Amino acid sequence: METVTKIDRRVIRTKEAIIKAFLDLFTQKDLEHITINEIADRANVNRGTVYLHYNDKYDLLDKLIDDHLNKLTSLCDPDGKTPLASELLPVFVYIRDHFLFFSAMLSTARAAVFRKQLLEFVSLRVKKKLDRHNTYSGIDCELNAQFMASAFVGIVEWWIQRRLPHPPEYMAEQLRQLFEKNEVYPTQA
């Protein structure tokens, strides 16, 4: 007989409430000034429930960041065969759908840690994709990847800070055109 682990919907709702409460607080104050009691109060749970899921507020933040970066990774084409706009669209949709998280991480003065992780995440994936294409453009592959990652993160920050003034499809297509126009991304990819 096979054992199937099923996640209780109440656990999912509780974790979502804790995360939302944390992100609301994170947009208002420094991480150092957020307490587990405040998170629990906003989430309408007791502090023991928060500790049941997370070791502390730093663990909560780390797990949130890891979870979102892992989900972004799953949206990227590992073989590098997908056209850039097609690969960017699900990323912009994901960012739109998780606006609260990305807004909290990128719209505050406390965004430096997440911004650095996002830059490393994007740069690594772009470099792998550029390496697979082996096209010599005279531009150092690592510098090109850093340039594209910085441009991407800057565009995402702009989009978030302006509260998503354009749909994801528009953003993906515009970014693809910018990269191709500036010859920083192979057009056959």
Image: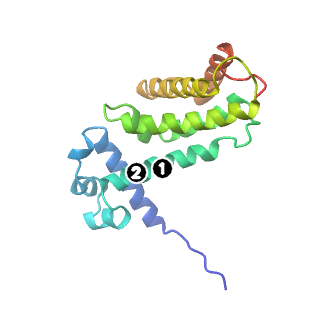
Q: Is the residue marked by circle 1 packed among few (<14), some (14-19), or many (20+) residues within 10 Å?
A: few
Q: Nearer the viewer, residue 152 or 117?
A: 117
Colour setting:
rainbow
Q: Nearer the viewer, residue 88 or 119?
A: 119
Could you tell whether 142 is left or right of 155 in the image? Answer: right
Q: Position of residue 188 (x, y in %)?
A: 79, 25
- Residue 174 seen in render: yes
Q: Are marks 1 and 2 in contact (CB under 8 Å)?
A: yes
Q: Which residue is mark 1?
A: 66
Q: Amino acid at mark 2?
A: Asp
Q: Hey, which residue is sitting farthest right in the picture?
A: 188
Among the 4 quarters of the image, the one containing residue 179 = top right
Q: Is residue 64 above or below residue 119?
A: below
Identify the mark at residue 62; answer none if there is no mark: 2
Q: Is residue 179 above or below residue 78?
A: above
Q: Secondary structure at mark 2?
A: helix
The residues tagged by marks 1 and 2 sit, at their Cα atoms, a distance apart of 6 Å
